[in-house]
Amino acid sequence: MLNSPSFFLALALPVAFAAPAPAPAAVAPAPHPMITARASLTDRTPSRVQERDVLSSIEGLGSYLTSVLGTYPSYIASGVPNFFQDFPTGSDVASSLGISSSDLTATPTQALNIPGYANWTDQGWNLRFRGNIYKQPNISESKLNDLANVFLVGTSIEALPPAQQTQARNLTAEIFVVQQGNVNVTFNLEPAASQGTDGTSGGSNAITPGGGAQNITIVGETTVEGDFDQFIPLANVSGPGGYLLPGNDTTSIQRVNVYTNGTDTGNATSYLVPPAGLTIISDIDDILRITKIYEPEEGLLNSFARAFTPWMNMPDIYANWSNSIPDFHFHYLTTTPEQVTRNYMDFIYKTYPGGSFDTRPLNFSDVSATLSIRKFLLEKIFQTYPQRKFILIADTSNSDVMKDYPAMVTEFPGQVQCIFLRNTSATDSGDKFPYDTSGFKNISQNQYMFFLVPDDLTNLDIVNGQCYNATIKQNVTFSEQGLPFGLSKKSAAGRVSVGWNGVMTAGLAMVFGVLFGVL
Ligand SMILES: *[C@@H]1O[C@H](CO)[C@@H](O)[C@H](O)[C@H]1NC(C)=O
Ligand SMILES: *[C@@H]1O[C@H](CO)[C@@H](O)[C@H](O)[C@H]1NC(C)=O
Ligand SMILES: *[C@@H]1O[C@H](CO)[C@@H](O)[C@H](O)[C@H]1NC(C)=O
Ligand SMILES: *[C@@H]1O[C@H](CO)[C@@H](O)[C@H](O)[C@H]1NC(C)=O
Ligand SMILES: *[C@@H]1O[C@H](CO)[C@@H](O)[C@H](O)[C@H]1NC(C)=O
Ligand SMILES: *[C@@H]1O[C@H](CO)[C@@H](O)[C@H](O)[C@H]1NC(C)=O
Ligand SMILES: *[C@@H]1O[C@H](CO)[C@@H](O)[C@H](O)[C@H]1NC(C)=O
Ligand SMILES: *[C@@H]1O[C@H](CO)[C@@H](O)[C@H](O)[C@H]1NC(C)=O
Ligand SMILES: *[C@@H]1O[C@H](CO)[C@@H](O)[C@H](O)[C@H]1NC(C)=O
Ligand SMILES: *[C@@H]1O[C@H](CO)[C@@H](O)[C@H](O)[C@H]1NC(C)=O
Ligand SMILES: *[C@@H]1O[C@H](CO)[C@@H](O)[C@H](O)[C@H]1NC(C)=O
Ligand SMILES: *[C@@H]1O[C@H](CO)[C@@H](O)[C@H](O)[C@H]1NC(C)=O
């Protein structure tokens, strides 16, 4: 009895059901998985998970839960193993470092300039400018070590090899920047040289426009968090080689360099993308790089300390697409926080074709962004290109992907060409997190594929809508699946329906793992 899965399901599932429903009085409303309250910098103890109390009361599970859920902060227990959470912003940074604004006066202003995309409108090219203005305080190595240790739950910087210590300090320094609100930002634009089509170079035969050099100032000042994000029409100015090509008269993607005036830290290449054509929207963690976000210890080190490493031969797949698909627009969309964008860009542009970028903005005041960052970012790019078709790619360990990617099929009819999902549960026994395939129920099999290795994507004619490699067995139940020992089958049969958004789902997955001796 004790070893039978159904026994534990019977015990544990009512809790899972209860969690996403209107919260019981004792339990705080479940935070949206992608956003949690800011960490208190002085409190070094991982926050106690309120939901844990509910589960701990279940006889026999208490000590296990205390060990798993007590070791890692609430973001693990709330079902989203995202290690880049709870970053300080604004005055929290300055106060935690003991610095005043006058200490920073002499420090140069820096700019994070996130490579943008432009659409063709009645006003001409309309380019998205997005990024952040900040100052980097001079933080001593020992202070950086202390700060890094806040993030390195379960280990410490002293325990890491030197190269990983350097990387952990680099990331920590990027997080502890003082964002500059109420700043005017000006950019200097000029045509960007094409750099070929391989991984290191911008990709997809994007071309150099003949003209278009101009200065552009964003409308208004940066937000209190130092962010800016707006579309601004480009003037049609001539250069030595002529003009920008109009979007209604070319299928080519044009590259422009966008330099932030007054600093050499804010250079980016942005893309003028014609109305029709094919865009790939690619997630990064566990599809383009090895993160193992679903294995707490590995995910933490891969996020904070180890050098970013490509996942298998994915770079070859992207290089082939970049070389063989004419005018293919690459867009990298990750919900990793803006503060670590540079590290992601640095890795991507050394390894994969060049393209525009999206990361999680600091400013959560927009309600739709608060509810769902990924959905918000996806809708923004779909709305910008109502005639383009999109290839969406990620892995099954993101609960928002599993919901938002298939939702695009109905929300933007005819615009989703393919959805590719790497099934991390199938190939990685360390992935105990269930994934919900119910969103795919009404989508034609030829439009999506759950795959195992990059080679499964070879020889597919994605331009003509061949998204499914018939040699890859799919096993999709259109329900919650991926729990150890085929528990998903019960789920499919309607006996069990573990809500992925339930705050305890991840905890449950791990509980199952331990109870069945597979962790
Ligand atoms: C940072 O501070 C250290 C000592 O606190 C000093 O030696 C170093 O020159 C400073 N660096 C910069 C760039 O100001
Ligand atoms: C930003 O520019 C506007 C308009 O030119 C000006 O009124 C404002 O004072 C500037 N703000 C700062 C902080 O320089
Ligand atoms: C942009 O502004 C700079 C001064 O900051 C000036 O030197 C440059 O000529 C301007 N470029 C254009 C295209 O107007
Ligand atoms: C800019 O103007 C030139 C000259 O009128 C025209 O040939 C070109 O198509 C225009 N380009 C854009 C992007 O509007
Ligand atoms: C492109 O759009 C511009 C401005 O809207 C228009 O003047 C021009 O005739 C169009 N060109 C083509 C090839 O449709
Ligand atoms: C660019 O910044 C410099 C100071 O760094 C300033 O003198 C110049 O006017 C700025 N250019 C524009 C176009 O804002
Ligand atoms: C940014 O571009 C400017 C102008 O080309 C260059 O001088 C500077 O070195 C670049 N900055 C970086 C970090 O590459
Ligand atoms: C951290 O590393 C990235 C990527 O190598 C680099 O662009 C960035 O300037 C570094 N940041 C700091 C604060 O050293
Ligand atoms: C261009 O993009 C903006 C911003 O997403 C959008 O509001 C607008 O409708 C788009 N215009 C066209 C013609 O697609
Ligand atoms: C399908 O996947 C297999 C195994 O990864 C691969 O060899 C093959 O090239 C893929 N493509 C097609 C169209 O079969
Ligand atoms: C490369 O990509 C093209 C375009 O999608 C496809 O037709 C071809 O089969 C791919 N080649 C390999 C080896 O995957
Ligand atoms: C489907 O199930 C088979 C048998 O368990 C497994 O080998 C395969 O990896 C699964 N496929 C996917 C895409 O998960």
Image (cartoon, helix red, strand yellow):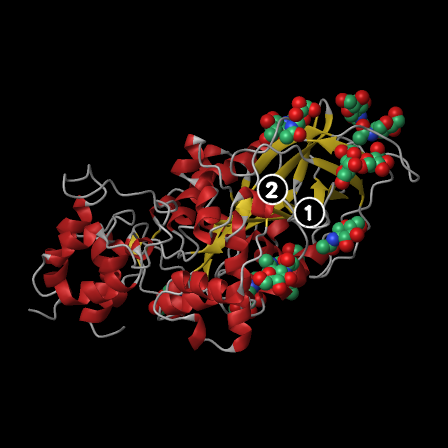
What's the amino acid at mark 1? Gly
Of 427 and 164, which appears nearest the observer? 164
- Which quadrant of the rendered structure holds the N terminus? bottom left
- Which quadrant of the rendered structure holds the C terminus? bottom left
23 left or right, relative to 380: left
Tag 2 residue: 131
Tag 1 residue: 266
Instruction: Determine whether the residue tagged by mark 1 lies in a helix, strand or loop.
Output: loop
Tag 2–tag 1 contact (CB < 8 Å): yes
Is the residue marked 1 within 8 Å of ligand 7, measured from its CB?
Answer: yes
State which quadrant residue 293 falls in.
Answer: bottom left
Of 430 and 483, which appears nearest the observer? 430
Is the residue marked 2 within 8 Å of ligand 8, measured from its CB?
Answer: no
290 left or right, relative to 326: left
Q: Is residue 442 visible?
A: yes
What's the amino acid at mark 2? Gly
Name which residue lies at 65% across and 37% down: 129
Q: Residues within 10 Å of mark 2 (few under 14, many from 20)?
A: many
Name which residue lies at 55% across and 69% down: 166
Instruction: Determine whether the residue tagged by mark 2 lies in a helix, strand or loop.
Output: strand
Task: Classify 483 as above or below 89.
Answer: below
- How far across and how far down the image is residue 86, in percent? 40, 50
Quadrant where ligand 3 appears = top right
State which quadrant residue 299 falls in.
Answer: bottom left
- How far across and how far down the image is residue 287, in percent? 51, 60
